[in-house]
Amino acid sequence: MCDHGDNNKSNHDNDNKPVHGDDNNAGNPVAEAQGETLEAGTEQNVPGDVGTDMTPEFTSGEIRAGKALFELQWSFVKGVVGLQHLPEADRPEIAFAGRSNVGKSSLINALVRQNALARTSNTPGRTQELNFFQAEAPLYVVDLPGYGFARAPKEKVDAWTKLVMKYLRGRQTLARVYLLIDARHGIKKVDLQTMDMLNVAAVSYQVVLTKIDKIKTAQCEAVLQATAKILQGQGAAFPLIVETSSEKNIGIAELRATIANVMKQNI
Ligand SMILES: Nc1nc2c(ncn2[C@@H]2O[C@H](COP(=O)(O)OP(=O)(O)OP(=O)(O)O)[C@@H](O)[C@H]2O)c(=O)[nH]1
Ligand SMILES: [Mg+2]
């Protein structure tokens, strides 16, 4: 998937192109999202921008389930500044974590195909609350403030970093954390600290490389290998890495598919 030359818009992101296979749940996107993957083993794997050992391969059913999940109307529920304000833990949730400016909010917007559901900015420290999003599906999507450097007062950054870590450690219904890593920089010390914390708390997490449009294929392959090597020693890490570009819509269909799988496994 690192092979992302000019023509490398993800094969799976042509929203007008139906994926092959019967469409028994047509008209009911949630049922489709939950049902299609049951047959996944019988469907043909989707060819295209997958092909390293550690990048996921998906069946057309899984890709379709992901697509259906994020075709739903996603909306903002609330911004949380203290754990006492968390919404009721009545459904699985996934959260997007990572250093400030890594592209968490942009990735959520790419998933839901909306430019401004989650607020983004050039300035590190844009997201300052735990922002919850929902749709007609049993899943919360949570956009987290970034850790590391942020252009905001230190006390504020310390407070939201503490809140994020507490949330990540303690939220019962957190089904998976998507840990975003800027593909230009790879895993940094502060990411390793977060991974350690998630390992200790036994919270499942999966690494997503972001902004791969900004680097060449060889560099992307190198960071992918280096990341996979680090993940081998991490107890709670899901071993497969998703490489993405929100800007160029690369890897977004695959990420949707992993999320649909997580939702299915947790309801
Ligand atoms: N080229 C490129 N730029 C991206 C991509 N994803 C995000 N960006 C840019 O990176 C900057 C930060 O994006 P955000 O989505 O706000 O990052 P964030 O991780 O939510 O940042 P905080 O909320 O501050 O922690 C913005 O200027 C985005 O336009 C990508 O895939 N490719
Ligand atoms: Mg943000």
Image: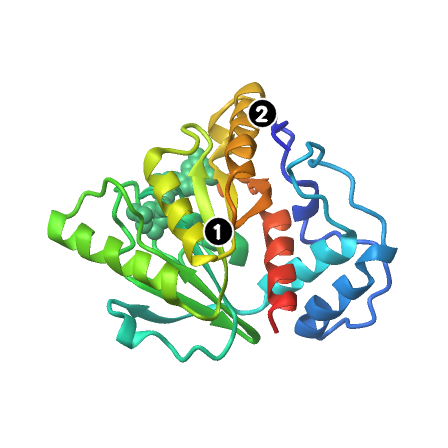
Q: Are marks 1 and 2 in contact (CB under 8 Å)?
A: no
Q: Residues within 10 Å of mark 1 (few under 14, many from 20)?
A: many
Query: Residue 178 got which mark?
Result: 1
Image quadrant in which the N terminus is located = top right
Question: Circle 1 — which element?
Answer: strand
Residue placed at 63% from the left, 27% from the top? 3
Q: Depth check: 10 or 226 in front?
A: 226
Question: Circle 2 — which element?
Answer: helix
Compared with 144, 87 (above or below) is below
> Residue type at mark 1?
Tyr
| Alpha carbon distance from label 1 to label 2 | 20 Å
> Residue type at mark 2?
Glu
Residue placed at 40% from the left, 46% from the top? 196
Q: Depth check: 169 or 109 in front?
A: 169
- Find residue 212 and report its horizontal and vertical position in percent: 51, 32
Residue placed at 39% from the left, 39% from the top? 192
Compared with 55, 135 (above or below) is below
- Find residue 55 and report its horizontal and vertical position in percent: 65, 38
Query: Residue 221 got which mark?
Result: 2
Of callouts 1 and 2, the N-terminal one: 1
- Find residue 224 and report its horizontal and vertical position in percent: 55, 30
- Find residue 220 and report its horizontal and vertical position in percent: 54, 26
Image quadrant in which the C terminus is located = bottom right
Res 41 visible: yes
Q: Residues within 10 Å of mark 2 (few under 14, many from 20)?
A: some
**The furthest residue to the top:** 218
In the image, is the residue at mark 2 within 8 Å of ligand 1 by its beta carbon?
no
Q: According to the image, what is the colour scheme of the structure?
A: rainbow
